Image (cartoon, rainbow, N blue to C red):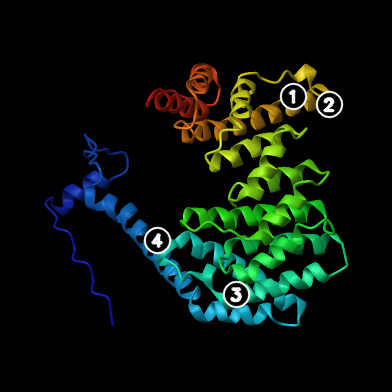
Amino acid sequence: MDEQAAPEPEVSADESAIAEASAPGSLPEELPPVEPPSASFIMQLFLVPAIIVAAVIGIWALFGQLSASEQDWRQLVTELSSGNEHRRWRGANGLAQMLRADIELGEDGQHLAANEQIADEFAALMSDLLDEKSRTDEHLQQLDFVTRTLSWLDTHESTIPGLVRATSSEYPEIIRVTAARSLSVIGGRAVEGGAPLSDPRITDALIDASKATEPLIRQACVYALGVFPGDASRQRLLTALEDPDSLVRVNAAIALGRFQDTAGVPELLGTLDDAMVRAEPSQMPGDNDQERRLNAQAEDAVKTLIAGNALPMLIQLKTELTEQQRSDARSRAAKLADGHPEIKIRLEAQRAVRELAEP
C-alpha cells in the first residue's frame, strides 16, 4: 500500500519575501525562538523504547520459566542416568542449577528438593564416585560438586547414606569437610521445619570425624553436631570445648548454645574480647610487608565473623545466663558497639546491649 503524502505546511509569507530573505548575503534580523522538546517527544525518545525492552525481557523470562517445566527435569534425570559420561554430567549440572533456582522460588516452585527420582539419581552418582579409586583433581571436583548438591535435597533415605560415608577417613579432607557441611545444612533445615533429625548414623559419623587430625574437619563436624540433638552430640561438644584449635572451641560453644546449653559461654565471651583487638601486621607471618598485611586483614575478618555469630547466640541464651554472665556480655557488647570498625558488628552489639538488659 502506498504511503500517504504528508500535508504541506501553511505559508504565511509571500514568495518574494522568501526569495529575498534567501538571497546570498542577507540574514534575518532575528533567529527563531528555541523551544524546549515537548513531553510527548521525550516519551517517544525514552519511555517507548524502555517499554519495548521491558516487554522483550518479560517474554524472555516467560520462555525461561516455561523451560523449567516438569518435562525438563525428567529429561535431565534421564541424562543423569546415562552411561555416556558427557551426558551424565550435563544432566547433573542442569539439575543442580534447576534445584537451586527452585529453592529460591519457595512455595511457587516445583518442590524438586523432595523429588525422589532426582534424589535417587544423585545418590547413585554419589555412590559411583565414592567407589571410584581414582583421586585425580577432576574426580575430587566431581565428588565435591555432588556432595554439595545433596545438601539441597530433602529425601533423607536417598541422600544421608552417601554423605555419612563421605565423612569417613578413607576420603580426602575436602570431601569430608563438604560432607559434614552438607549434613549440617540438611539438619538445620529440619530444625527450622520443627522436626529435628535424630539419626544415629549421622551423629556417630560426625563424632568419629570430629576426632580427625585436620582442624578443618573437626571445625565442620563440631558445627554440624549442633543441629543433631542428643546426649552423644552434647558429650562430644563438651569435650570439643577443650580442643587446641580456637575455631573448634568456638563452633562447639555455638553448637551447645543451640541446645540452650551455657557450657560454652566463657568461650563466647572471649571471642568478644578478641574482636576488639586488631591484628598487628608486624607480628604476622609473611615473607614481606604486603603478605603480613594480608594475613592481618584475614585474621581480623575471622574475628569479625566469630563475633557476628557469638553475639546472637548470647542473646538467644539470655534467659539461661547468670547475672554475672549477663553483665559480662553487656559490657563486652557495649565496647563493640562503640568501637568496632564494622557497622554490622556495631549494630548487632547495640541489639545485644538492649536485649541483655531486659528480663
**Label 4 Cα crowd, 10 Å radius (few <14 / some 14-19 / many 20+):** few
> Amino acid under label 2?
Gly
Q: Which residue is mark 2?
A: 286
Q: What's the distance in space between the residues labelled 4 and 1, CA to CA? A: 47 Å
**Label 2 Cα crowd, 10 Å radius (few <14 / some 14-19 / many 20+):** some
Residue depth check, mark 3 versus mark 2: number of the one nearer the observer: 3
Q: Which residue is mark 3?
A: 118
Drawn side of residue 51 relative to residue 232, left or right: left
Drawn side of residue 328 relative to residue 206, left or right: left
> Where is 333 relative to 148, above or below?
above
Drawn side of residue 4 relative to residue 346, left or right: left
Q: Which residue is mark 4?
A: 53
Q: What's the distance in space between the residues labelled 3 and 4, CA to CA? A: 37 Å
342 and 218: which one is in front?
Answer: 218
Q: Say which label, 3 or 1, has the lower sequence index.
A: 3
Label 4 SS: helix
